[in-house]
Each structure stands twice: as C-alpha cells, then as structure tokens.
Image: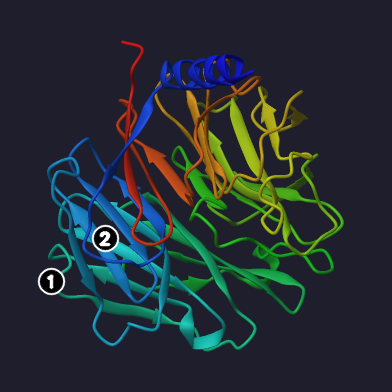
Amino acid sequence: MGSLIRAAFLFFVCDSTAFGQWQQQTIQTDADFRGLAVVDSNLVWVSGTKGTFGRTTDGGKTWFAGTVPDAKALDFRDVEAFGSDTAYLMSAGAGEASRIYKTTDAGKTWKLQFQNREPKAFFNAIAFWDEKHGITLSDPIDGRFHLMTTDDGEKWIPLSEKSRPEALPKEGCFAASGTCLITFGENDVWFCTGGAKTARLLHSKDRGKTWTAMDTPLLAGIESAGVFSIAFRDRDHGIIVGGDYRKPDDTVNTVAITGDGGKRWTSIEKPLPFRSGVAWAKDRWIAVGTSGSDVSTDDGATWKPLDREKYNSVAFTPKGAGWAVGPKGRIAKFTKTDE
C-alpha cells in the first residue's frame, strides 16, 4: 500500500509540474494581497490590507512594500498600473472606506482622487482602457449598480441613472481579486455578479453607456456564491470562475467557458474548487483560489492542479509572464517547465 501511495504522489507531482510551477517571492509585509497589476516581465504592482502596496522592477528579485499615508485602515482590493511611476489604488469598504488613489512618482506620494460619500456603496474593482480612461464598480445603490468613469485620469464621474444597470434582489459583486470588472479592446467592459438567484454577466460595448445582461450556469442563490472573475484571451474565447467562497473545496458549477464572445456560457465537465481569479497566460489558462491553483492547456475544457497554496488573484502579460498573490504577503511568480 505504501508503494502505491508514493507512486500516486509522484504521479501528481510530475503531472502538475509538467505544466508550470509557482516560485514564492519575498516582500516585507504580512498584508493580505488581492490587487495585482503585471505591467511587464520586470514591473509588477500589488495591493492589499493595512493600506499596503508593493512594487518590483526586477521581476520579483526584490520587492518594495509601502503604505499610503492616512490609509492604514483601508483594504486596497485592486491596483492598476501604467509603467513604473503611475498607478491607481482602489479600496473596498462601506461608505467612506471606498476610495481611489493615484501616484505618478512610483508610490512616493499618493493623491486621493475620490472618496465615496454614499453609505450604501461598496467598491469592488477598477479597470482601464488606457491610462486616462477608466471605470470603477460598486455594489448596487437603490436597485442599480453604481459605476463611475474617468476621461482624464483625474476626475471620477458617476454614470447617469439610465446607464446604470438594474440589479436583481440581493445581487452584488465580489471584491475578491480585482477581476469581477474588466475592460477589453477599445470600448468593451464586463462585470460579473453573485448573491442573487442567478449569477450574471453584464456587458457594455460603449464604455458603460448601455448594458446587456446574461445569465450564467455558475452556482447562485447564496449570498456567498456567484461569478468572481472573468477573462478573455480574444474577443470570442473567455472563462468565468467562482463558486461559494465559504465552501472553497466544493466543485459545483464553478467554471464556464465561451467561444462566441460571451453570448453563451457552458459549464465544463469536471469543475474546479472555488476559484476567485482566472487569467490567460499566452498559451494556457491559470485559475487560482483559496484552495489552490490549476492550469488548462485546452481552452478551459480540462484542468490540472498546480499546487494547493492560498491565492486570491492572478495576472499575466501577453508574453506569458505572470504572478499570483494571496494572504499574509504571499507573492508567487509562474515558471513554465514544459519548454
């Protein structure tokens, strides 16, 4: 029996590492990270609890960790970066805890661009089409999702009421990885939901002026369940992941794929455990969550486990350089081992 167990373990290790490995990196903080912006193979920004942000300019060999002044109580759930100097931080929280900061000097100083005054708002994610044109998403206020946009990278303006899509009863979004809201191309924007009787996707082709809603097959009907992350590798092929974050090992309706630009979403035959982030890594998909990470090389149809560490977010460059982040200062760099 012992030899059989050892053989099974070796098969698991060899089978999973054939698709890639995570290399843990060191940063001097125990903050929980959810925000992740991979600019290129050398430049990466991270963000998290205790008002913390981090930055590397040498591919993760060394990391700088800092805190935004007067923001140590904030949880920066998302970061978007443009080069080595410019980055935006978004904090999540009820009322005034939801904020947007910007730096143009590599984090030496931060400008508070927006502080929410609406008690019912709770920011979930921020995304950009380019350095000056972006959008941010909050949970619904009075039955409509609350979204704001910027056209100059400085001022944030709420969308008009007619441009804010209606929410289902108990529907909201998950500020788990910064990828419940994404932009694609020059004008497209998507966001995903949960908590209601149906887990939905909402899509705009005109930077948020008009929206189309569609149901997904992912787990729904529970406040802790729904779609947590969405990603596309091109205009047609995309993946959504999620589940119930309170049951991280359950594999009921946690992944769906599309090949027609999101018109139809199909559950895969063997779902993963709960996953909060998914990203395209040049020639493969990588999904991460609080029970581990997985890789797919057949466009999401089947998956192989990479490890069983805890992660919240994952991101890659178009050329395949990627990182994942998680609790207690966890940062890991992805290394392909099949080349």
Please identify the quadrant where the C terminus is shown.
top left
Residue ID for mark 2: 87
Residue at (84, 68) in percent of width and height: 169
Residue at (49, 46) in percent of width and height: 183
* Residue found farthest to the top: 339
Look at the numbered disc 2 and give the secondary structure of its residue.
strand
Q: Name which quarter of the figure residue 143 lies in.
A: bottom right
Look at the numbered disc 1 and give the secondary structure of its residue.
loop
Q: Is residue 302 visible?
A: yes
* Residue nearest the observer in this picture, 321 or 106: 321
Question: In this rendering, would 60 be left or right of 308?
Answer: left
Amino acid type assigned to the residue bearing label 2 in the image: Ala
Amino acid type assigned to the residue bearing label 1 in the image: Lys
Please identify the quadrant where the N terminus is shown.
top right
Height in image: 212 above or below 170?
above
Residue ID for mark 1: 108
Q: Looking at the picture, how far across and down is residue 10, in whole percent? A: 48, 17
Q: Looking at the picture, how far across and down is residue 318, in whole percent? A: 34, 29
- Mark 1 against mark 2, which lies toward the viewer? 1
Q: Looking at the picture, how far across and down is residue 85, in whole percent? A: 15, 58
How many numbered circles does the render carry?
2
**Mark 1 Cα-neighbour bin, 10 Å: few <14, some 14–19, many ≥20:** few
- Is there a contact, CB below 8 Å, between mark 1 and mark 2? no
* Residue found farthest to the front: 1
Height in image: 119 above or below 38?
below
Residue at (27, 54) in percent of width and height: 45
Q: Is residue 264 visible?
A: no
